[in-house]
Amino acid sequence: MTFTFVILGVVTLAGAMAAMSLRNLVHCALCLVAAFGGLAGLFLQLDAQFVGLAQILVYIGAVAILIVFAILLTRGSESPQQPIVAGRWLMGVAVAALTFGSLMVSIVTSTLISSANGPKPNVAADISVKKIGAKLMTEYVLPLEVVALLLTAALIGAVIIAMEEQARLAPEGSQSH
């Protein structure tokens, strides 16, 4: 285990745990960005350049920023959230334990673990960022454009909803046209 892996793992786990435990939504979103950054670093360390750069561009550059904008645009004069009820907290811990247990059972009973000690094929991946980009710009242009339009429509919809919410919360005399 390398020192870089340990640092990236700590950053990822700390960011994820802080995103789950903090009360301020903006702080949670920024901690989620740190967790996404740690994951991108792990992917880049594993020589998965496309996945690492996609993690940076899509999740950090688009999704996390969209979450921060949505939080900031839709924040109004709402009252602070009520504290978490003890029963809900226990239910969350139970669901997390059940999920962890089922993942551990599937990992332990996996055939990959038993075949990990056997001979490994010496096959190098023939996929590069350049080849994936060429495929996206030649064969998959239509799906790429559809995704771009969908994200643009979602952003416009979020702005319209935020504007309607702001107009509804504003006093009658203070609206400007």
Image (cartoon, grey):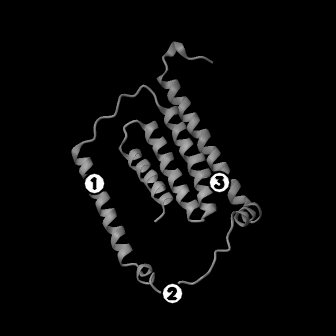
Q: Mark 2: which amino acid? A: Pro
- In the rendered structure, the answer to whether residue 9 lies left or right of residue 49 reads left
Local packing at callout 3 (Cα closer than 10 Å; few below 14, some 14-19, many 20+) is: few
The residue sitting at 68% across, 59% down in the picture is 143
Which mark is drawn over residue 93? 1
Q: Secondary structure at mark 3?
A: helix
Task: Identify which amino acid the numbered label 3 is placed on.
Answer: Val
Residue 136 drawn at (x, y percent): 72, 62
In the drawing, does residue 173 fall left or right of residue 141?
Answer: left
Residue that appears at 44% across and 79% down: 112
Q: CA distance from mark 2 to mark 1?
A: 40 Å
Q: Nearer the viewer, mark 3 or mark 1?
A: 1
Where residue 57 appears, as percent x and y from the top left, is 62, 51
Instruction: Please report whichever mark, 2 or 1, sits nearer to the chain's N-terminal start.
Output: 1
The numbered disc on residue 119 is 2
Residue at image position (22%, 48%) is: 87
Q: Is residue 139 above or below residue 59?
A: below
Q: Is residue 30 above or below residue 40?
A: above
Q: Amino acid at mark 1?
A: Val
Q: Nearer the viewer, mark 2 or mark 3?
A: 2
Which is more N-terminal, label 1 or label 3? 1
| Residue that label 3 marks | 147
- How far separated are the C-alphas under marks 3 and 1? 36 Å
Disc 1 is placed on an element classified as: helix
Whole-number angstrom distance, CA of label 2 to CA of label 3: 41 Å
Q: Position of residue 88 (x, y in %)?
A: 26, 47
Residue 175, image quadrant = top right
Q: Is residue 171 above or below residue 84?
A: above
